[in-house]
């Protein structure tokens, strides 16, 4: 008789990796909230930090939901693994943040 999945801790390790990702996004957002207004001279730039904190919270919540879904799929339902929607969403957000950073740097350089 074959076993459906390895009873190791892979889903938990994946959830911990997403948790570290959420923490790093949160810390980066807090640093941005602290430094951007001083560097750029406008408190409006702190909104980017608040947005980052919201993204970090969403990553944290989605990681917990993914862990529950994976555990349910592997142990109870015996269904195929849940899709990669969370990874796609994070890649999309990271791409948008990178693109907006390029625009911001270009704007600051051109206005100087």
Image (spheres, rainbow, N blue to C red):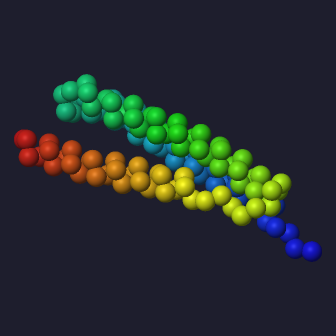
Tell me what residue is drawn at x 57 percent, y 49 percent.
Answer: 18
Q: Quadrant of the N terminus?
A: bottom right
- Whether residue 89 is situated above or below residue 51 in the rendered picture: below
Could you tell me if residue 104 is visible in this image? yes
Which residue is situated farthest in the bottom direction here? 1
Could you tell me if residue 27 is visible in this image? no
Tell me what residue is drawn at x 48 percent, y 43 percent.
Answer: 24
Quadrant in which residue 92 is drawn: bottom left
Residue 59: x, y in percent? 53, 43
Quadrant in which residue 62 is drawn: top right
Which residue is situated farthest in the right direction here? 1
Q: Is residue 9 left or right of residue 104?
A: right
- Whether residue 33 is situated above or below residue 110 in the rendered picture: above
Q: Nearer the viewer, residue 39 or 1?
A: 1
- Whether residue 98 is situated above or below residue 3 in the rendered picture: above
Residue 87: x, y in percent? 52, 56
Quadrant in which residue 51 is drawn: top left
- Whether residue 90 is situated above or below residue 54 in the rendered picture: below
Residue 49: x, y in percent? 37, 34
Q: Quadrant of the C terminus?
A: top left
Residue 101: x, y in percent? 27, 47
Q: Is residue 107 left or right of residue 72?
A: left
Q: Is residue 93 left or right of residue 20?
A: left
Q: Is residue 10 left or right of residue 44?
A: right
Tell me what residue is drawn at x 83 percent, y 54 percent.
Answer: 76
């Amino acid at each position: 008789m074959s076993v459906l999945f390895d009873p190791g801790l892979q889903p938990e390790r994946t959830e911990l990796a997403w948790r570290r990702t959420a923490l790093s996004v949160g810390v980066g957002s807090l640093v941005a909230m602290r430094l951007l207004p001083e560097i750029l001279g406008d408190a409006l730039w702190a909104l980017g930090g608040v947005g980052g904190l919201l993204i970090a919270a969403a990553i944290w919540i989605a990681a917990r939901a993914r862990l529950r879904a994976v555990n349910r799929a592997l142990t109870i339902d015996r269904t195929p693994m849940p899709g990669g929607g969370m990874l796609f969403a994070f890649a999309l957000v990271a791409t948008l943040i990178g693109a907006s950073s390029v625009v911001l740097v270009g704007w600051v350089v051109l206005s100087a």
